[in-house]
Structures are given as C-alpha cells and as structure tokens.
Image (tube, grey):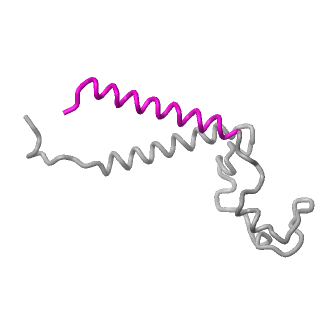
Amino acid sequence: MSTPTTNRRYAGFLGAFLLVALLLAGGASYLASGFPDGLDAVTQTGCSETEGELQGQCIAQNAGEHATAESPLADYAVGGNDALTGVAGVVGVIATLLVAGGLFWLLRRRSPSSDREP
C-alpha cells in the first residue's frame, strides 16, 4: 500500500528526472558535432568530396538518402534548420519517455484480485 509521502517522493523523482532529461536534450543537442561520425568517416575512406560529389573509390559512393530524409525531424533538426537541434532533442526525449512509459504501463505486473487486501 502506498502512502502520500511515498507518492510525493515518486512524483518528485519523476519530475526531477524529466527536468534533467529535457535540459540535457535541449542544451546538449547544440554541442553535437555536425561533422561525420566514425561510421560515416570509415565509409568515406578513399574518397574526397568536391562540390558535394564524392570522388575516388569508397563505400559511400553507393549510398542513397534514407527513407525518412524528408521527415520533420531528419538529421537531428526540425525542418532541416540546424538552429533547432535542441527542439528536436526535446521532442525525441518526450517521444521516448511516452513510448517507454506506455510500454511499462502495459507490461506492469498486476496483483491477482484474490491477493488484494480489503
């Protein structure tokens, strides 16, 4: 059985967690590098980029756009605007927490009705 104090602590913890997650997503998103990550750099080994075209022999020459390239949150930005990476981070955190919370709510253990106290 939960007490009001336990419920307040739980709500306080969840509120603090959400605040920290949103601050990190909104603030740290602006510190992310726009340069290729390790995987992109490896696929471009052996090529050089000239006027947006890859010259040479590398794996990346055969790459195409991904299926969600035109989506509103593609490339960690809102609508392709790099100034809005923090907004994309916040939206991502909220979406992740909603999906995770929904799954936890659906999959939580429920005590059988015969075990409940009157």
| Residue 112 included in the magenta stretch of the image | no
Tell me what residue is drawn at x 78 percent, y 52 percent.
35
Question: Picture coordinates of residue 69 (x, y %)?
Answer: 69, 56
Looking at this rendering, what residue extends furthest in the right direction? 50
| Residue 45 sits in quarter | bottom right
Question: Picture coordinates of residue 86 (x, y %)?
Answer: 66, 37
Tell me what residue is drawn at x 34 percent, y 27 percent.
9
Tell me what residue is drawn at x 7 percent, y 34 percent.
118
**Residue nearest the viewer, comparing 41 with 118:** 41
Whether residue 50 sits left or right of residue 41 in the image: it is right
**Residue nearest the viewer, comparing 113 with 17:** 17
Whether residue 9 sits left or right of residue 24 in the image: it is left
Question: Picture coordinates of residue 5 (x, y %)?
Answer: 28, 24
The relative height of residue 94 versus residue 11 in the rendered view (above or below) is below
The relative height of residue 112 versus residue 47 in the rendered view (above or below) is above
Kindly report the secondary structure that dominates the magenta region of the rendered protein.
Answer: helix
Q: How many marks?
A: 0
Tell me what residue is drawn at x 54 percent, y 42 percent.
93
Whether residue 31 sits left or right of residue 15 in the image: it is right
**Residue nearest the viewer, comparing 30 with 79:** 30
| Residue 18 included in the magenta stretch of the image | yes
- Which quadrant is the N terminus positioned in? top left
Question: Picture coordinates of residue 57 (x, y %)?
Answer: 84, 75
The relative height of residue 7 versus residue 83 in the rendered view (above or below) is above
**Residue nearest the viewer, comparing 33 with 74:** 33
| Residue 26 sits in quarter | top right
Please report the bounds of the magenta region as a residue range: 1-30
Looking at this rendering, what residue extends furthest in the bottom direction? 57
